[in-house]
Image: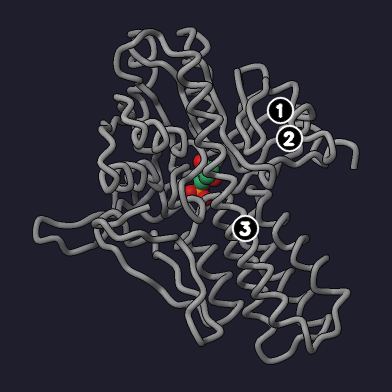
Amino acid sequence: MRVNGTPWRTIWPVDGVRAVDIIDQTALPHAFSVRRLHSVEDAAQAIRSMQVRGAPLIGVTAAHGLALALASRADDDTLLAAARLLAATRPTAVNLHWALARMQSRLLPLPPATRIDAAWAEAATIADEDVDQCRRIGIHGLQLLLAGRRGEGRLEIMTHCNAGWLATVDHGTALAPVYAAFDAGIDIHVWVSETRPRNQGLLTAWELRQHGVPHTVVADNAAGLLLARGGIDAVLVGADRIAANGDVANKIGTCLKALAARAAGVPFIVAAPRSTIDFACANGAAIPIEERAGDELRLLHGCDSAGVAGELRQLPATAAVANPAFDITPASLVDHIVSERGCCTADRLQSLHPEAADG
Ligand code: MRU
């Protein structure tokens, strides 16, 4: 996707050096900055601090982190220790574990001397596949949106968190159909919820603005009213992990939108690649929910009137807070799941991915 007219990915290897560059998402939407990762520790810190975030991008970053880990030694111990470090960064997005497992099964059978080149090649393949999968999600998701729209007027979509290109390598998951619609000349508008406390909705607004897609930011609490008023064609969100029964873990607040959508008769659609589906996880109760630092609630981040970034305290340091980062939307509230393979109802995931269900 483009930033000020120039195409970017969220992560890319640096030419001629064993290093990876990322867009630092903690600086957005106020500043656009690139950070260089030189080591597996850098990669782990970037994931933990959410400089990179979003389930698919976390997986791709972890794959590159393993490649970085092998720079000085490529033996089994180094590889396994790096995988353990990266696996401990964030618990909910299963793409992290999927990418680490794929890298290890590719690298462990190889003699150590050949592992470094193989690791960089596999990480690049995972990144390229993510781009292609998201592009396909865009095509399938757009067909679904057009089939279910209320009329011939403007297509009105509500989303939550950021499941755009910033959360993947390119295109996004939930926003891929939005970009596909906009690029096809379809009149489309997106309702973007802030997504307290990390405000990933502001990332969504930033990337929609960069692409020229009409959108409106609303407080999370406005979603119920907007849905009840009847002007929205679909709620479209991403996922961090989808259990075998179709239960969906996604950013905290997603389940409230699904409930409001069901009450208003608005389709609730989840878009995610195969790497987000965890067939080993029977249902949502088995998905680990990340509990993040309380200061994400106690402090507000932004810019002052001179544009200088800073923080404001809204609660004392000792205030008791809870900060669960994800919730579970039961499969019964999910009308459609869209992957790179096509669309299905939440109880028919195996129909899209029969080979994985068998294994
Ligand atoms: O905590 P984050 O910002 O990593 O959470 C991201 C989300 O919950 C997204 O909605 C999800 O990963 C889908 S991203 C394509």
Name the amino acid type tagged 3.
Gly
Image marks 2 and 1: residues in contact by CB distance under 8 Å: yes
Q: Residue 197 appears at what percent x and percent y? A: 40, 44
Q: Quadrant of residue 357?
A: top right
Q: Is residue 349 visible?
A: yes
Residue drawn at (15%, 57%), measured in percent from left and top?
304
Residue drawn at (69%, 68%), measured in percent from left and top?
122
Residues under labels 2 and 3: Cα distance? 17 Å
Give me the disc on residue 59. Answer: 3
Residue drawn at (63%, 49%), measured in percent from left and top?
93
Numbered marks: total: 3
Taking 9 as reference, is 246 above or below it? above
Q: Which residue is mark 2?
A: 243
Q: Secondary structure at mark 1?
A: loop
Give me the disc on residue 246. Answer: 1
Q: Residue 348 appears at what percent x and percent y? A: 75, 23
State the residue in front, 164 or 251.
Answer: 164
Q: Residue 58 appears at what percent x and percent y? A: 57, 57
Which of pointers 2 and 3 lies earlier in the amino acid sequence? Answer: 3
